[in-house]
């Protein structure tokens, strides 16, 4: 049998994409609550939250806040062993800089975790999944300000103390590496609450904010282990492996250099110090990242217990020697379409083998247990007249990825803790703010404009995944 007996099969979501109730129970606004829906080719906008007539999809989301008991019952029916979600920081500290937490918010998660545990489902909790308090952005400039470390550590200690007997698996920052893409304001905003000022060096500001987050993460790992030595505290990175377009040595070297971007965050989380390539980059570019004398020791002492990562797709790079054709460029200037893999409707290059490759790369580099905490296929689902959704494409995507996980375990000896496909119940898409980009085993009746009854129904993939879990991955 490939998968260990206590393999953590489950599903993943994030508070702001499912809960709704954005101002209920004393909750304050987060960076996600002031983002509009993207529509008709117009990207999501970051606002100050008061634009008349704009639609904020996270305000109601799928009302998991009001409906979690029914939703958890459906997860239990599928046989989930774990459920990954996040705690909305603003339910606990509405502004982020308070000393006393909001009891109503704490109680909400107590009740939700009790409901999970009642069904034998382990909560897997991200402390910060793109939902930093908006007040911390306005007042302090988000993570560019070192003071935010204190607030985050206080929040994390509060919830870790409160749930120390209910939650064992934690992660600090979701897809912390997204902000490396400084050209994308959405990624930077959701990861760090940073908005760039005219004339400043974006990359240098990004690295400064990141340094604060990495120090905060390390402090939380250390404090968490004091609260409960059994805690398993991981990082969470988006892992998009990069292939060289050809075996030309220049393509290969470009691949190595491009991968530095992928390793940068996990290296600090897992090894407790910055990679040599990062220090050289800062030196070369003349960046002055401010650090306190104690930071090196904090990073060294706060290394993670496991590597949590999302995997959706792979990427490829082609150097100048191969004469980049303009039409091939998909991302950064050297990123090109891979002719050997197909892309989803949103251009995500689907590559199951890339998951085995990623598992190998991460395992060989860190020799830490791995946890695939996001993977999945965002698609437009069609609801038939009889109410069914025949999402065979989703089943195919997940099956082929699980097959590669199996190979990584049995052939390569990778240690894999669990698998939580993204958006196990349909939720608001992060990048587009849409509902039509669906990932779930459970369909939610809601459209892009926010209309719908929010009724839940099972898709074809529901029973398929139930059987995968029941057979511990034997029947795919
Ligand atoms: C990751 C995020 C999730 C999520 C997922 C799918 O980047 O951690 O929050 O939404 O991607 O992305 P999308 O919803 O844009 O399809």
Image (tube, rainbow, N blue to C red):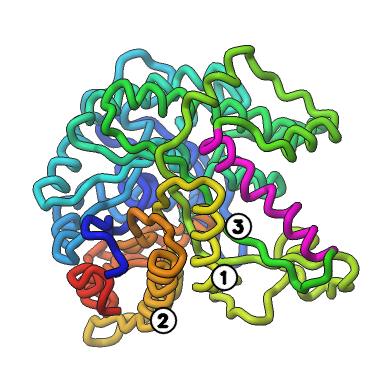
Q: Position of residue 160 (x, y in %)?
A: 29, 28
Q: Nearer the viewer, mark 1 or mark 3?
A: 1
The answer to whether 280 appears left or right of 176 in the picture is: right
Q: Position of residue 18 (x, y in %)?
A: 33, 52
Q: Which residue is tagged 1? A: 346
Q: Which residue is tagged 3? A: 43
- Disc 1 crowd rating (10 Å Cα; few below 14, some 14-19, many 20+) is few
Q: Could you tell me if the residues under marks 1 and 3 are in contact, i.e. CB atoms within 8 Å?
A: no
Highlighted range, magenta? 250-271
Q: Position of residue 177 (x, y in %)?
A: 58, 45
Residue 422 lies in the magenta-colored region: no
The answer to whether 335 appears left or right of 148 in the picture is: right
Which picture quadrant has residue 454? bottom left
| Residue under the point 47% across and 52% down | 309
- Disc 3 crowd rating (10 Å Cα; few below 14, some 14-19, many 20+) is some
The answer to whether 43 appears left or right of 106 in the picture is: right
The disc, 1 or 2, on the residue closer to the chain's N-terminal end is 1
Helix, strand or loop under label 1: loop
The residues tagged by marks 1 and 3 sit, at their Cα atoms, a distance apart of: 13 Å
Q: Nearer the viewer, mark 2 or mark 3?
A: 2
Q: Is residue 142 in sight in this rendering? A: no
The residue at label 1 has a CB less than 8 Å from ligand 1: yes
Q: Is residue 235 above or below residue 379?
A: above
The residues tagged by marks 2 and 3 sit, at their Cα atoms, a distance apart of: 26 Å
- Disc 2 crowd rating (10 Å Cα; few below 14, some 14-19, many 20+) is few
Which picture quadrant has residue 171? top left
Residue 263 lies in the magenta-colored region: yes
| Residue under the point 40% across and 38% down | 305
Q: Which residue is tagged 2? A: 393
Q: Is residue 271 above or below residue 2?
A: above
């Amino acid at each position: 049998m490939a998968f260990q007996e206590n393999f953590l099969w489950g599903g993943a979501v994030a508070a702001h994409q499912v809960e709704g109730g954005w101002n209920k129970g004393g909750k304050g606004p987060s960076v996600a609550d002031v983002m509009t829906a993207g529509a008709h080719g117009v990207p999501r906008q970051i606002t100050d939250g008061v634009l008349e007539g704009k639609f904020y999809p996270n305000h109601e989301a799928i009302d998991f806040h009001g409906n979690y008991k029914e939703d958890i019952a459906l997860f239990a029916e599928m046989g989930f062993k774990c459920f990954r979600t996040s705690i909305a920081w603003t339910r606990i500290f509405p502004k982020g800089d308070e000393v006393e937490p909001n009891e109503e918010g704490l109680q909400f998660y107590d009740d939700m975790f009790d409901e999970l545990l009642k069904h034998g489902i382990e909560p897997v909790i991200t402390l910060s999944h793109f939902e930093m308090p908006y007040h911390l952005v306005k007042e302090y400039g988000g993570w560019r300000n070192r003071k935010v470390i204190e607030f985050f550590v206080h929040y994390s200690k509060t919830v870790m103390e409160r749930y120390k007997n209910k939650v064992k698996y934690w992660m600090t920052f979701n897809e912390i590496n997204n902000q490396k893409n400084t050209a994308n304001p959405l990624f930077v905003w959701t990861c760090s609450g940073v908005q760039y000022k005219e004339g400043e060096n974006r990359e240098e500001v990004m690295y400064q904010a990141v340094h604060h987050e990495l120090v905060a993460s390390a402090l939380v790992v250390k404090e968490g282990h004091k609260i409960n030595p059994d805690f398993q505290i991981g990082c969470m990175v988006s892992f998009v492996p990069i292939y060289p377009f050809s075996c030309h040595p220049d393509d290969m070297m470009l691949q190595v250099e491009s991968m530095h971007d992928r390793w940068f965050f996990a290296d600090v989380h897992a090894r407790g110090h910055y990679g040599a390539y990062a220090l050289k980059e800062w030196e070369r570019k003349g960046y002055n990242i401010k650090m306190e004398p104690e930071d090196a020791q904090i990073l060294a002492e706060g290394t993670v217990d496991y590597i949590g990562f999302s995997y959706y797709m792979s990427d490829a790079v082609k150097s100048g020697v191969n004469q980049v054709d303009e039409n091939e460029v998909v991302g950064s200037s050297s990123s090109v379409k891979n002719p050997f893999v197909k892309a989803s409707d949103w251009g995500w290059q689907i590559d199951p083998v890339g998951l085995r490759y990623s598992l190998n790369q991460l395992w060989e580099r860190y020799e830490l247990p791995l946890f695939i905490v996001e993977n999945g296929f965002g698609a437009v689902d069609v609801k038939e007249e009889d109410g069914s959704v025949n999402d065979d494409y989703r089943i195919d995507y997940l099956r082929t990825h699980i097959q590669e996980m199996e190979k990584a375990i049995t052939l390569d000896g990778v240690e894999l803790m669990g698998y939580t496909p993204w958006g196990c119940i349909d939720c608001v898409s992060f990048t587009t703010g849409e509902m039509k980009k669906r990932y779930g085993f459970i369909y939610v009746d809601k459209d892009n404009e926010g209309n719908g009854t929010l009724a839940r129904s099972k898709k074809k993939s529901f029973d398929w995944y139930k059987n995968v879990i029941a057979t511990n991955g034997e029947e795919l």
